[in-house]
Image (cartoon, helix red, strand yellow):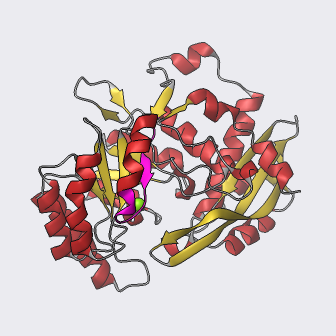
Amino acid sequence: MKLRLQFRRYRAPFRAAVRTAHGMWAEREGLIVRLENEAGAVGYGEAAPIPWFGTETVEEDEAGGRALGEWTTQEQIAAVPARLGCLKNALAAALAEVGRVSDPPSDISSAKGRVADPPYLGVAALLPAGRAALAQIEPRAELGFRVFKWKVGVGDAADELGLLDDVCAALPSGAKLRLDANGAWDRRTAERWLERCAERPVEYVEQPCFADAAQSDAARRKADDCLLGLAGDFPTPIALDESVVGAGDIERWIGAGWPGVFVIKPALVADVAAALAALEKARAAVVFSSALETAVGARAALRVAFAWRGEPDSTGAPQVRALGFGVWPLFADGRFDGPIAMPFLRAEDVARINPEAVWTALS
Ligand code: MG
C-alpha cells in the first residue's frame, strides 16, 4: 500500500524558558508528520528530538523524512535508520493511526483477554526548584494533586537538603514526593540525600547521577555502577530518566536487573511497542513522562500510558503511576498545548486532542 508522506517543521516558543542541565531552553523544535493511504485514511506523528538528551537533531530527522520522498511504503518506513529514533517514532505513530482509521478494532477483539483501559490517570504536580516549591504545594494540593515532583540538584546541595523536611511537612497527608536531580549529584551527595529520604514520603529519587554520551566510556560505566550501587544500598527507589533515552538503553537496564523505576518519555523512544513489551515482560515500574512535545506527540505518548498494563499493585491489579504530564499550558501558542494540567487526565481528554489543528497551525 502506497502512503503519501508530508511533514512540517515547527519552532514553538515556550511560555517561559525551561531550565535544563544544559542551560535555558526557550523553544521546542521538531517535525509533525502526516501519512495518508490511498483510501484517504490519515495519521499524524511527531518527531521531537532533544539532541542534548542523546537523540538525533531535527535537521537529521528532516533529511530522513525527505529521503523517504512524498510517496512511500510501510517497508521503506520500517527501514528508516535506528539513529533517527524520533522520526521512527513519529512515522510509527502516524502509521498506527492510519491503520486504526481504516480498520477500527472491533469491541470483541480489543477487549479479549485485556483489562479495560482506565478512564483516567493521575498526574504529578511539578514544583519549582529551591524554596519556591514551598508556596506551590498548598494550592496544588487544594486542586487535588497527591503526587509532587520537586527539582533538586539546581542550587547548593546542602541548602536543598535543608529544605526537604519543610517540603515534606507541606505535603497533604498520604501524598508522595518525587525528587529529580537530573544527574547533578556525585555519589556522596546522592548518598546523603538517600539517607534522609528513607523515612520520608519519597516515591523515588530520579537520576541522581549521570554521565552523558559526550563523556568517556569509563565515566559512563562509573555512573551506571553508581546508580546500581545506590539502588542496592538504600530503600528509596531510584528512577532512571536520562539513562534510558539512547537506543538499546531500556533493554540494557532490564538486562542488568534494574530494580527501580523507568521514566519513559514515549516521544523519544524509536520503537515504543517493543520497548513497552520488554518492560511489561520484566514487570517493570514505569512512569510515563512528557518530553515537552506538542499535543500531537503527547497524544501518542498518552495513548501508550493508558494502555500500559505492566506493573501490578499489591492486589495484582494493574496500576499506572502518576503521569509526568503536568506541563500544560506550555507553549506561547496554545494551539500546540495538550490538556491543561489537572490532578487527573481523562482518556476522553486525550481522545479529544486534534492533531490536525497543530498541522493546520503550521501551514
Ligand atoms: Mg527527569
Q: Quadrant of ligand 1?
A: bottom left
Q: Is residue 321 left or right of residue 158?
A: right
Going 43% across and 78% down the picture, which residue do you hit?
Answer: 213
> Taking the image as drawn, is residue 339 in sight?
yes
- In the rendering, at what x and y percent does residue 49 appear? 60, 65
Which of the pair 7/187 is nearer the observer? 187
Which percent across, then down, holds residue 189?
A: 19, 73
Q: Is residue 166 above or below residue 50?
A: above
> Is residue 291 found left or right of 91 in the rendered image?
left
Q: Position of residue 270 (x, y in %)?
A: 55, 57
Pick whichever, 225 or 21, lies toward us.
Answer: 21
Find the magenta span and give its range. Answer: 122-133
Front residue (pair 347, 172): 172
Examine the rendered structure and indicate whether residue 245 appears above or below residue 113.
below
Return the residue found at the far bottom.
216
Q: Residue at x 54, y 51 (%)?
A: 327
Question: Can you say which quadrant of the picture contains the N terminus?
Answer: top right
Residue 130 in magenta stretch: yes
Q: Residue at x 30, y 49 (%)?
A: 177
Residue 241 part of the magenta-drawn span: no
How many discs mark residues in the rendered view?
Answer: 0
